[in-house]
Amino acid sequence: MTDIAIRFEGAGKTYPDGTTAVEALDLEIPRGSLTVFVGPSGCGKTTSLRMINRMVEPTSGTVTVEGRDVTSVPAHELRRSMGYVMQQSGLLPHRTVVDNIATVPRLNGVPRRQARERARELLATVGLDASLAGRYPAQLSGGQQQRVGVARALAADPPVLLMDEPFSAVDPVVRQDLQRELLDLQQRLHRTIVFVTHDIDEAVLLGNRVAVFAEGGRLAQYATPEELLRAPADDFVADFVGRDRGFRSLTFVPAHDLPLHPVAVVRPDGAEGVVGPGSVPAGGWVLQVDDDGAPRGWLRPGAGGAPLVGGTLHRPGGSLRSALDAALSSPSGLAVAVDDAGRAVGVLRATEIVAAVERERQAQPSGTAAP
C-alpha cells in the first residue's frame, strides 16, 4: 500500500462566473501526517480541503483518498468515512454532548448504547471530564465545544481528519491548549490530518508539512516548517511568513547545549534557597516559587513590593526560540527553566542564549539565514 493517503492531481475549482478558487493543484499528503494549508483569505485553502470530502466538487483534475477517486464514492458515504471539524464546532444544540459525539456512528448503523459508550471514551481522549456527557452545547465554553467537535470527528475512528480553522474562534490561551492537545492526540492516534489556518505561527507549530497558498488558488510552496522558514520559495512566501521568520526558525534548533545556572528562590512561607547547580552571590534577582517549586514571579534586587510577573518558561528539550523568548520576556533577563512537573530547576542567561543564536546564524549556508 502506498504511503500517500491523499493525492491532488491537477485538481482545480472554477466557478460558473469564471472565478478560479483553486488552480491545478498537485499535492501528495503522506499517511499519518499532519499537513497544514495556510494562506491569506480567498486563496483556496478551505476550498482545497473541502474537495477532499466533496463538500466542494472539483471542476478539473482528480482528488484521491487511499487510492480511490473521491468522485467514485457517494458523497454521504465519503463524508461519513472522514472526520470533519469546523470553526464553530457545528454541534447540534438540541442534543447532549454524548449524543453529539455519537452522531456519525449512529448514522453508520451502530447501536445507540454502543455509540454512546464510544462517545464517553472519547471525552477523556480530548481532555473533557465525563461529567460533561449530559450537558448541552450552550452549557459549554468555546474551548469545550471545540473539544466535543474533535471527539465527534473521531467517533467513527476515521483514518482521515479534516479541520477547517477549528481554533480560530477561541481566545489565545484556550487556543494554545487546544493546539497542544491536538499534537498530543496525533502522537497517540497517528491519523492523517489536514488542517486549515490563516495563522503562520499555528501552521509552523502544528504541521509536519505546510502548504502555502497564494491568491488565485495557487500553491506557492509545500515544505516542512523548517524548510519554509529557512528558504521561502518566492517573495510572496517570504512576505507571508514574515520578516521575523529567522526568529521562528529557532523553533527547530535545540537548546540542550546551553548551561544551566543557579538562582535564588523564596517560598510563600519566606523560606529561602537555591535551585540549579552551584551557588549564587547575594544581592541578585530572586525567583518567587510556590510550595511545589513552580515559578510565580521575580523580586527585584534591593526592592520591596509585589513580585514582578515572570516571562514564559523554558522546558526540557525546548528550542532556542523557547529559551530566547523566556529570557526576553523575563524582568530579570534570566530564562527560567522548569522540569516536566513545572518546577524551577535553574536559569539560562540571555547573553549565552544570544551567543548561541549567533552561532546558529553563522552556521547557516549562505543565502538561508534570515535578514
Image (cartoon, helix red, strand yellow):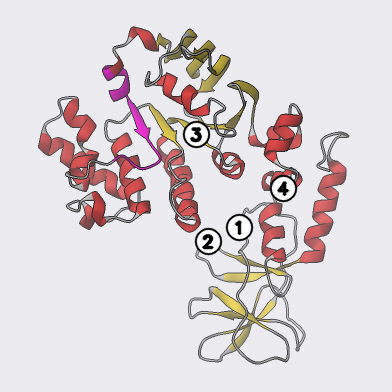
**Three-letter amino acid code of the residue under disc 2:** Asp
Secondary structure of the residue carrying tag 4 is helix
Q: Which is nearer the N-term, disc 1 or disc 3?
A: 3
Query: Under tag 1, what secondary structure?
Result: loop
Q: In this figure, which residue is indicated by the disc labeled 4?
A: 250
Of marks 3 and 4, the one in the foreground: 3
Reading the image, the residue beneath label 3 is: 196
Q: Amino acid at mark 3?
A: Val
Q: Is residue 157 left or right of residue 170?
A: left
Which residue is labeled 1 in the image?
316
Classify 10 Å Cα crowding around label 3: few (below 14), some (14-19), many (20 and above).
Answer: many
Q: Is residue 323 above or below residue 274?
A: above
x 52%, y 27%: residue: 45
Question: What is the distance, in whole Å, between disc 4 and disc 2 at their CAs?
Answer: 21 Å
Question: Marks 1/2: CA distance?
Answer: 7 Å
The secondary element bearing badge 3 is classed as strand
Tell which of 191 and 81 is nearer to you. Answer: 81
Q: Earlier in the sequence, mark 4 or mark 1?
A: 4
Q: CA distance from mark 4 to mark 1?
A: 16 Å
Residue 92, percent from left and from top: 23, 41
Q: Residue at x 21, y 34 (%)?
A: 103
Nearest to the eye among marks 4 and 1: give it: 4
Amino acid under disc 1: Pro
Q: Picture coordinates of residue 108 (x, y %)?
A: 19, 25
Q: Disc 3 versus disc 2: distance between alpha carbons?
A: 30 Å
**Sequence-earlier tag: 1 or 2:** 1
Q: Which residue is mark 2?
A: 340
Residue 273 shows in the view = yes
The N terminus: image quadrant: top left
Which residue lies at the image location 37% right of the left edge and 26% below the top edge?
A: 159
Q: Which residues are magenta?
A: 76-90
